[in-house]
Image (cartoon, helix red, strand yellow):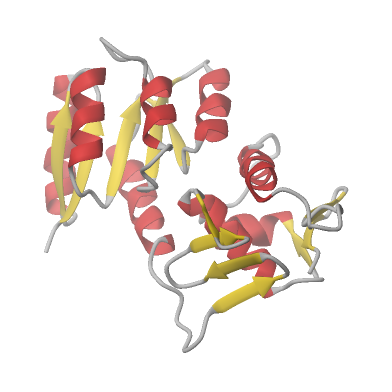
Amino acid sequence: MPHPVLIIDDDQELCELLGDWLAVEGFSLTAAHDGPSGLQAATGGDFAAIILDVMLPGMNGLEILRQLRQSCQTPLLMLSARGEPVDRILGLELGADDYLAKPCDPRELVARLRALLRRSQPASSDSNQLQAGNLRLDGDSLLAWRDDQPLQLTQSEALILRTLMEQAGQLVDRQTLSQIALGKSLGSYDRSLDMHISNLRRKLGPHPEGHPRIQSIRGRGYLFSP
């Protein structure tokens, strides 16, 4: 059964091209060509993943992302024009799981989508409930709670948290964490992992005793403090 994907992009020619590529690769594509209709489709449909352009008529892609992340945690890949790293940083801060520069190679887009879907699959474990004090994570569903109140984590944030909690008290180096949780190696100037960690820290808050849940080991990686 094809994986349903929503693309919100005003470039209709690009959407048709990607639709042809994705159909061959086992995806079905629904397209929206302006911000308001894209937001309506994203909130009203059931999609395996969303592809979102930054520059859109009617509503900016970053505003769509901000509104979506208030209630929707569907894996989301953001498209941004070359030379606009600020858009990518803002996208990650607002909850995008990945980004790709335009113009993009359809083969790379397909690979990124497959990586997002692989990472969204439940972990293979008979019992994958992780708990540290007042924080609880279901490693299969990637749902998290603090003081029994649900946390709105993106897929990438939840995967980072799961990886760190599974190795609580141990250093996880940056490359390993990125490969496991984000499905990619980090380049020399790639700050995407740091952005996800920053968002995750803000949502988790400190331990009740006041010390941080996730510690940075400068130049090496991150450690979850149990």
Residue 9 found in image quarter: top left
**Which corner quadrant holds the N terminus?**
bottom left
Vertical side of 160 occupied by 188: above or below: above
Q: Residue at x 33, y 30 (%)?
A: 52
Q: Residue at x 37, y 34 (%)?
A: 68
Instruction: Name the spot of residue 84 as percent of width and height, x first.
Output: 52, 16
Vertical side of 98 occupied by 3: above or below: below
Residue 12 found in image quarter: top left
> Can see residue 117?
yes
Vertical side of 25 occupied by 202: above or below: above
From the viewer's perspective, tell me whether residue 190 is left or right of residue 41. right
Residue ranking furthest to the bottom? 126
Instruction: Name the spot of residue 217 as percent of width and height, x first.
Output: 87, 53
In depth, the one of 12 and 217 nearer the eye is 217
> Can see residue 101?
no
**Which corner quadrant holds the C terminus?**
bottom right
In depth, the one of 47 and 135 nearer the eye is 135
Instruction: Name the spot of residue 145 as percent of width and height, x first.
Output: 56, 61
Q: Residue at x 50, y 38 (%)?
A: 95
Tell how many labels.
0
From the viewer's perspective, tell me whether residue 195 is left or right of residue 30. right
In depth, the one of 201 and 20 nearer the eye is 201
Residue ranking furthest to the top? 58
